[in-house]
Amino acid sequence: MTKERLITGKTKLLGVIGHPVEHSLSPAMHNAAIAHLGLDYVYLPFPIAPQNLEIAIAGLAAIGVVGFSVTIPHKQAIMPLLSEITPLAQAIGAVNTVSRQNNQWVGTNTDIEGFIAPLQTTYKQDWSQKVAVILGNGGAARAVVAGCHQLGFAKIHVVGRNVQRLQEFGNSWNNSPISENLQVHQWEELPKLIPQANLLVNTTPIGMYPKVNESPLSVEEIANLPKGAIAYDLIYIPKPTQFLEQAEKQGAIAIDGLEMLVQQGVAALKIWLQQETVPVEVMRQALQKHLGLG
Ligand code: NAP
């Protein structure tokens, strides 16, 4: 029998801000962890339109919110509204986790930790001679680039379709040590890059539900992926994506986006609760159940 969870005047508030926020998976994941730990917290969805962001952040402070997740479209817009931003979040240029510390909002980004988690545990190896090829140059690609740099990749190639956005992406790292091993390329250069890839990451939404029959790469392109390379798709539904299915057929190791989602949440909850131990398996199962995978 599950213990009844009572919300009282003392219950501490956590949440997620976004627009829209109805489809966020974070409430299911974090409330499962809170219930498992028996803590007097609740994690709520806060739908906040872009024009209300500033007033909403002040409101969250006024009602004593302990911390919150940040999702689309606020990940960059929130930055000037915070008192402090960790160097990691500054390097990426986006915040996904905010906590209240000494009456001030402090922003960080746990997507890097989420992304690298499987590469540091299950698939741990020496990455210093390895090559990463990243498809897409949007928000998530920034965390992936920073993560690959943190793991020590020798070369990081980012491939995009829009020349201007690609150049801006490349230039945005100019003041960072990351720029030393980073190169940007147009999509047409992929046939030359794929045979070099030890890690191939899809950060584009191609193949995401409901367009489950699409893949960022053709069968011919993916056939040149070296055997034993890792194909990593940030998409978590469907499981597996076309991209991962094709890569596995070529003898690649497949990692989907679910673990990244779990681990970025784990890292955020540790910050809010100021404790090192959170129930990772409970959070993973809550997500799987919510996504109809469990
Ligand atoms: P985003 O900022 O919109 O970036 C998407 C990137 O994909 C852009 O570079 C875009 O290129 C490119 N792209 C889109 N359609 C394309 C196409 N048909 N051909 C080539 N490139 C295309 O989105 P995001 O926030 O980075 O998210 C990207 C994906 O990662 C989503 O599927 C999201 O669900 C997933 N994600 C997963 C996690 C996780 O925890 N697992 C975390 C974050 C994101 P243009 O700039 O030319 O449009």
Image (spheres, rainbow, N blue to C red):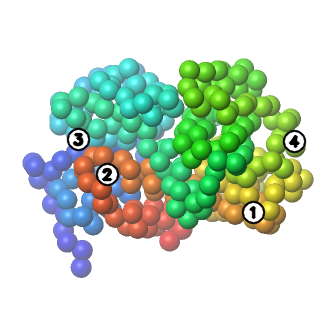
Give amino acid for label 3. Answer: Val
- Mark 4 highlights which residue? 192
Is residue 47 visible from the viewing direction of this image?
A: no
Q: Which residue is mark 2?
A: 270
The amino acid marked with disc number 2 is Lys
Q: Please report the residue visible at 28 percent of the width from the left and 38 percent of the height from the top.
A: 99
**Amino acid type of the residue that numbered disc 4 sits on in the rendered structure:** Lys
| First along the sequence among labels 1 and 3 | 3
Q: Quadrant of ligand 1?
A: top right
**Residue tagged 1:** 228
Q: Position of residue 224 (x, y in %)?
A: 86, 54
Where does the image place residue 101, in percent across and percent down from the top left?
22, 35
Q: Is residue 120 left or right of residue 138?
A: left
* Residue mark closest to the camera, 3 vs 4: 4
Q: Nearer the viewer, residue 226 or 245?
A: 226
Q: Are marks 1 and 3 in contact (CB under 8 Å)?
A: no
Measured in 3D between alpha carbons, the distance from the residue under mark 3 to the one under mark 4, in whole angstroms, is: 49 Å
